[in-house]
Image: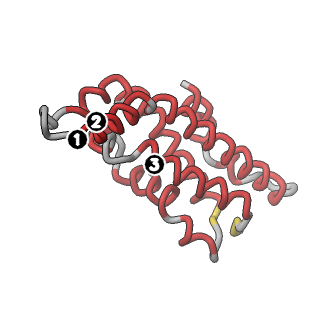
Amino acid sequence: MQLKNPEIFSAIESIGEHYRSNISNRFTRRALSAMSLDPGTWSLIEELTEKVDNYRYQGYHLDELYAQILALSRFTYQARREVVPSLRYTASSGTGPGKVSESDRVFRDMAVNNFGPNLKILADKLNELYVKVATIDKTQAGTRNPVYSQIAELHEIGRYLVE
């Protein structure tokens, strides 16, 4: 079954904008690229954060959308552990004195200082999306088992988003 709910599309667009602007930007990208996530996870993250227009007409298959939500949830979990502790060093490495303009230095410092809180915002947005999708899934399933009950890793989503 295809999911074509405007609220879901709006939530996904909001997540994508937040991710591109505050999480994966030119000041943090180097640190993010060093994370220990497999290529499939990165691909699912890209699908969710950058390709919403591809789904606007055909809609989302629930299992695909859950996989994308899980991938970005795993990302937030890993980023808290791998990126946050060393981001200040990683973001400033390779840029000696005189190589960075004053305005870029200010923007870099803002990106670094706000990365943790921005991850929390991303996690909150993802949780809201998951709850909305699961509610629709449960309603559409009727007497059958909803799709989310068939994906074991979804039981871990709370841990991914909260810790």
Which quadrant: the C terminus?
A: top right
Q: Nearer the viewer, residue 149 or 35?
A: 35
Label 1 residue SS: loop
Residue that protrudes farthest toward the right in the picture: 143
Which amino acid, by three-letter code, is at mark 1? Ser
Q: Is disc 2 surrounded by few (<14), some (14 to 19) or many (20+) residues within 10 Å? A: some
Residue 80, by quadrant, is top left
Which quadrant: the N terminus?
A: bottom right
The circle on residue 21 is: 3
Separation (CA) of disc 2 from disc 3: 17 Å
Q: Position of residue 103 (x, y in %)?
A: 30, 40
Separation (CA) of disc 2 from disc 1: 6 Å
Q: Residue at x 76, y 55 (%)?
A: 137
Residue that protrudes farthest toward the front in the picture: 102
Indicate which disc, 3 or 1, sits on the residue closer to the N terminus.
3
Q: Residue at x 73, y 58 (%)?
A: 7
Q: Nearer the viewer, residue 25 or 37?
A: 25
The circle on residue 9 is: none
Separation (CA) of disc 3 from disc 1: 20 Å
Give the residue number, with chain letter if any, for mark 1. 101
Foreground tag (3 vs 1): 1
Label 2 residue SS: helix
Q: Nearer the viewer, residue 162 or 67?
A: 162
**Callouts 2 and 1 close, C-beta under 8 Å:** yes
Residue that protrudes farthest toward the bottom in the picture: 57
Give the residue number, with chain letter if any, for mark 2. 105
Which amino acid, by three-letter code, is at mark 2? Arg
Q: Residue at x 42, y 50 (%)?
A: 41
Q: Position of residue 158 (x, y in %)?
A: 62, 32
**Callouts 3 and 1 close, C-beta under 8 Å:** no
